[in-house]
Image: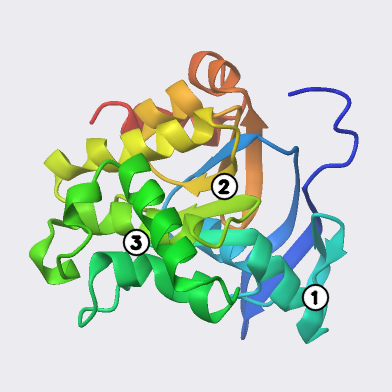
Amino acid sequence: MSENNSQPIIVCKDVHKWYGEFHALRGVDMEVAKGEVIVIFGPSGSGKSTFIRTINRLEEHQRGSIAVNGIELSHDVRNIEKIREETGMVFQQFNLFPHISVLQNVTLAPIWVKKMPREEAEELGMELLTRVGIPEQAEKFPGQLSGGQQQRVAIARALAMQPEIMLFDEPTSALDPEMIKEVLDAMTELAKSGMTMLVVTHEMGFARAVADRLFFFDEGNVVESGTPQDLFNNPQEDRTKLFLSQILQH
């Protein structure tokens, strides 16, 4: 992380979120530098997915502030649109369109949203499918692909909008174990290319190898954060120690 990038690309201050009476996020603070890879982990219901979804306004926070690339996330629709242009998102479910080819899934948004000429979009699409290791699947339909391949198409689709930031919400949790590695390999390559990434995951091997910093969430709070070395070798909080001891046994 270079010091000269004085302006963090994501700044979250005292972010709160309620669902009715349920206080899902309780004052989350996080600053992310450009090119940093952040892994967010913690038990189910700890607010990890809610938090990552507030960054591109898939969930609305009710208190505190979120700024992405200097743009404040407010009720201004133009700001929300700008932020969504800069953030790609990959979910647990691939959400691919089943009735069009893999390549068409990847090129749809650049053509419609960015008004990119079809030929250029298809060239970019093939580059991205090559990058995630499945160029030979371009003409197939999503239903003809394995779950791991479909998730890699979803990654290529998010990258096709040429975002500054990639958000991943438990991208491997719906996959069979033998398909997880191929998706994590594609994400590792992306991280090494300098992409700013926030990843909600339980894949601790990936976190150890790729993350610059880890954030442990529990009950809507950041309990502890630090480098993988800090958290794996010397966690400070009992809650972190307990969670890691449970998750690292598997």
Residue located beneath label 1 in the image: 79
- Of badges 2 and 1, nearer the viewer stands 1
Mark toward the start of the polypeptide (1 vs 3)? 1
The answer to whether mark 3 and mark 2 are in CB contact below 8 A is no
Task: Quote the CA–CA distance across marks 2 and 1.
Answer: 28 Å
Image position of 180 (left or right of 237): left
Where is residue 221 drawn, in percent x and y? 65, 52
Residue type highlighted by circle 2: Phe
SS for callout 2: strand
Badge 2 is on which residue?
A: 217
Q: Position of residue 157 (x, y in %)?
A: 41, 62
> Which disc number belongs to residue 92?
3
Reply above or below: 148 against 177: below
Q: Amino acid at mark 3?
A: Gln
Count of marks, rendered view: 3
111 sits to left or right of 224: left
Q: CA distance from mark 1 to mark 3?
A: 26 Å
